[in-house]
Image (cartoon, rainbow, N blue to C red):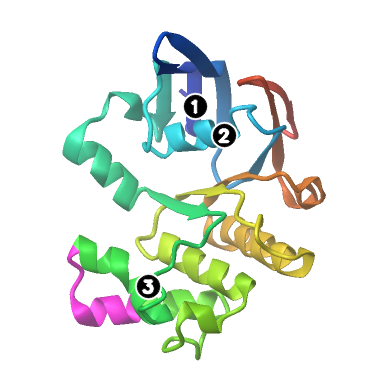
Amino acid sequence: MSEENHVVLKDVWKVYKTGKVEWPALRGVNLSVRRKTLTMVIGPSGSGKSTLLNIIGGLDKPTSGSVFVNNVDISKLNGRKLADYRNNHVGFVFQSYNLLNYLTVFENVELPLIIKGVPHRERKELVLKMLDMLGLKGMEFKRPLELSGGEQQRVAIARALVNAPNLILADEPTGNLDSKNAQIVVEVFKNLVVEHGKTVLMVTHNVELTRYADVIVKMRDGNVVEVVGD
């Protein structure tokens, strides 16, 4: 398998069952995501975009097929190994910021490090570095509700990055933002790729934002129908 590919899906199916009814969300998806690229996934609602991200992120398992991340088939991981993959190798960013409003900005970003058992002094250094990188310096002691939507999403991105994952999965991260803040957030992702060597896979309905993408993956009816820029 090529070292330039960060993620490779081979004939991935995901079939959900409700009683006797089966509904295939993914229908034999084959896809390669290159390292250090901003890859955007577009397509109508119900095309399988979020399911694709959840499976790559280890939040869901495929019904069949293989999902390789860094040449490891994560679809075969269970228990502690799968938890380690999610906690240390992947950063998740969602449409809803999922911040805890009773915690400060600093405390929200610090949470993954506490869970990981990182010592206090090292946590402080890592959190402040991440907030500075995302233009949030000086906001450490504010609460999420004191921030704009764009600022809250950048806090969510800082939290996703604080464990230093190389793969960032973003599901409609600009869905709740106006056009100006949406552009700022996507520019943050672009900078993570160019300046920090991250791989970003982002689902979006906003076709205007695809001008920032290195690769555009078009999905329909549970499959990849076109890859542009690969």
Q: Which one is closest to the eye, mark 1 or mark 3?
A: 3
Q: Residue furthest front?
A: 19
Residues at circles 2 and 3 in contact by the CB criterion of under 8 Å: no
Residue hosting label 1: 8
Q: Earlier in the sequence, mark 2 or mark 1?
A: 1
Q: Element under label 3?
A: helix
Q: Residue at x 43, y 86 (%)?
A: 140
Amino acid type, callout 1: Val
Q: Position of residue 224 (x, y in %)?
A: 65, 22
The span from disc 2 to disc 1 (Cα, nearest Å) is 6 Å
Q: Position of residue 169 (x, y in %)?
A: 51, 47
Q: Magenta part of the protein: which range?
A: 117-126
Asked if residue 170 lies left or right of residue 107, the reply is right
User: Depth check: 188 or 52 in front?
Assistant: 52
Quadrant of residue 47 in the image? top right
Amino acid type, callout 3: Asn
User: Depth check: 64 or 148 in front?
Assistant: 148
Q: Residue at x 65, y 64 (%)?
A: 185
Instruction: Specify the quadrant that holds the C terminus.
Output: top right
Q: Element under label 2?
A: strand
Q: Position of residue 115 (x, y in %)?
A: 22, 62
The span from disc 1 to disc 3 (Cα, nearest Å) is 32 Å
Residue 192, compared with residue 211, is above or below; it is below
The span from disc 2 to disc 3 (Cα, nearest Å) is 30 Å
Q: Earlier in the sequence, mark 2 or mark 3?
A: 2
Q: Which mark is residue 33?
A: 2
Q: Which mark is residue 108?
A: 3
Q: Is residue 118 rendered magenta in the image?
A: yes
Q: Earlier in the sequence, mark 1 or mark 3?
A: 1
Residues at circles 2 and 1 in contact by the CB criterion of under 8 Å: yes
